[in-house]
Every structure is written in structure tokens, then in C-alpha cells.
Image (spheres, rainbow, N blue to C red):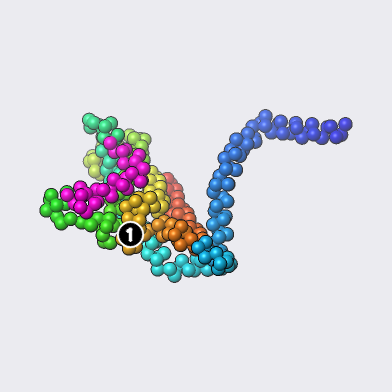
Amino acid sequence: MEKIAAPLARRKRWASLLSERRLVPFLLILPTIVILAGLVLYPLLSSFYASAFSYNLAKPYLGRHFVGLGNFLTAASDPQFIESVRLTLILSAVAVGVELVLGLAVAVLLNSNLRGMGILQTLIIIPLVMTPVVAGLTWRLIFNPSIGIANFLLESVGLPPSEWNAGPSTALLSVAIVDIWRTTPFVAIILLAGLQGLPPEPLEAAKVDGAGRWKAFRYVTLPMLQPLIAVALLIRVIYSLQIFDTIMILTQGGPGFATEVFNVHLYKTMFRFFDVGYGSALSIVMLAITLFLCFVFYRYTETAKGK
């Protein structure tokens, strides 16, 4: 009887837990947790493990040697790595800064009651839904020094033609232009949602106090939009740090090393030179930079909410 009673008691305990719905949420998300652990956690741990070794797939005869933090120390003294980080930060600062200003202007325009805003919203969305490869191919044709429309427009207003993505001094600017064109609608959509969700009472109070449109926008609307601005900045900064496909279509990191941003440098390290250990260390550095930026923006968002 005791052997039969014990399983029955366990079944009753499990039945009571399930009946009280304590375990149901955990059981429902368990498959997702298992899949994410396999797709995220395992590669992450593998990267940490590989970063501690000196190992090159193109030179298997050299073997695998434990170097500890040696790969990270190599990155700290690698001028090409430092240059790739510098180019990435410049590209992110220029692209995200312009996108924020243009996105805010577009959001304010779309939030107005002018005619044709529905059609304009549809047209603005087009760059966002284009794949990076298609956008890159389109802009590579636009920037073509011989037949591209960009030089045609410059010459039509009396300016000299530019080399655009083929010139060392203009290639990074060309990439920034494409990134701004593609992702400004994303920022505009986020800020438009914020504008449409703002309470009308503070703006009405500002008008009663005699504030004009600009002062009401600067001192009332913008402070209330700060949390959404922080979210848009966070998402765009993270994705700008990960830009890869557009550059590979436009310039492939060239000319020379003019557009070899971090992800392109990482790609060449891993898939052209097959330096698995050093490439894994670089990927961890990028993860650390991204997490740091997420922490900074999170603190900024929480501070903005508390005001």
C-alpha cells in the first residue's frame, strides 16, 4: 500500500500545482528557452572557449595552443582593429545623428493634418522594407562615377563629379548616405507613434500660457519624447555597429581599408584568414561594446522616466 500511496501523493502534488497554474507559464515557455539556449547560449560559450586559443583553420599543422587573454591583448595592439573600431564609431555617430534629426522632422510632418499624409507615409516606408542587398545594388548604380545619377545631379548644378564609394575620402560618406536613406523611416515611425500617444493636456496648457509652436515643441513635446528617443537611438546604434551587408555590396571594405568597419574586419579575420581564436575574441569585444551601450541607454531611459 505504501508503494502505491507514494506515487499517488506525488501525482496529487503535481496536479495541485498545475491546477493552481503555477507551473503552466514555465511549461509553455520551456521549448522556447531550450531553443534559445541552443541557438544563443551554445555559440556564445563556444566563442568564449575559442577565444582562449590560438588556432587557424588555414594552418592546422600549427595546432591549437592555449593563450588565455592573448587574443584580446593582440586586439588592443592591432592597428587595423583599432582603425575598424574608429571607422565604426564615426559611421554610427554620423548616420544615427542625421537619422534622429531627419526622423524627428518626418515624424512631426506626418503627425500634421495636411492632405496626402497617408500617401507620404506609404512612400517613406519603401526604403525600410527594401532588403540591404537590393538597396546596396541600387545605390551602387546611383554612385557609379560614369553612369550614376549622383554625378549627373552634381554636374547639373555646376559642381565637380565625385568618386563616391570608389574614393578613399568619400567611400565612408557614401555608406552613411545609404544607411541614412534606409533607416530614417524606422526612427520616424517610432517617434510618430510617440507623438500620437502624447497626452494633449500639457500642450494645451502651454498654449494657454502663451507659448508658441516652437517653444511648446522644445519645452513640452521633446521632454515627453525622451524615452522613445532613447529607445530609437539604442536600436539604431546597435544596428549601425552591426552594419555589414550594405558595405559588402557597395565597397567590400575598400577602397583600401576606407570602409573596413568592425564587422567587415571580423568577417575577413574569420572567413578569409580563418583565424578562429582571434576572430572569436573580436566578436566578444563587439558583444561587450554592445552591452555597454545598452546599459548606458537603459540608465538614460530610466533617468528620463524619473523626471
Q: Is residue 136 above or below residue 49?
A: above
User: Residue at image x 14%, y 55%?
Assistant: 159
Q: Image quarter for residue 193?
A: top left
Q: Image quarter for residue 262?
A: bottom left
Of 201 and 127, which appears nearest the observer? 127
Residue 199: x percent and y percent? 35, 35
Q: Which residues are magenta?
A: 123-152
What main secondary structure does the magenta stretch of the protein show? helix
Quadrant of the snapshot with the N terminus? top right
Q: Which residue is mark 1?
A: 254
Q: Is residue 7 left or right of residue 181?
A: right
Please tell me whether mark 1 sits on a helix, a strand or a loop: loop
Instruction: Determine the residue located farthest toward the bottom in the rendered image.
Output: 77
User: Residue at image x 34%, y 35%?
Assistant: 196
Q: Is residue 249 left or right of residue 142?
A: right
Residue 164: x percent and y percent? 25, 55
Residue 230: x percent and y percent? 39, 48
Magenta run includes residue 19 = no
Q: Is residue 299 above or below residue 57?
A: above
Q: How many marks?
A: 1
Q: Is residue 167 above or below residue 298?
A: below
User: Residue at image x 26%, y 38%?
Assistant: 109
Residue 26: x percent and y percent? 61, 38
Q: Image quarter for residue 114?
A: top left
Instruction: Determine the residue located farthest toward the left in the rendered image.
Output: 158
Of 154 and 36, which appears nearest the observer? 154
Q: Mark 1 is on which residue type?
A: Gly
Residue 178 visible, this orientation: yes
The crowding category of the residue bearing disc 1, from other C-alpha atoms within 10 Å (few below 14, some 14 to 19, many at least 20), is: some
Residue 101 visible, this orientation: no
User: Residue at image x 24%, y 40%?
Assistant: 213
Magenta run includes residue 124 = yes
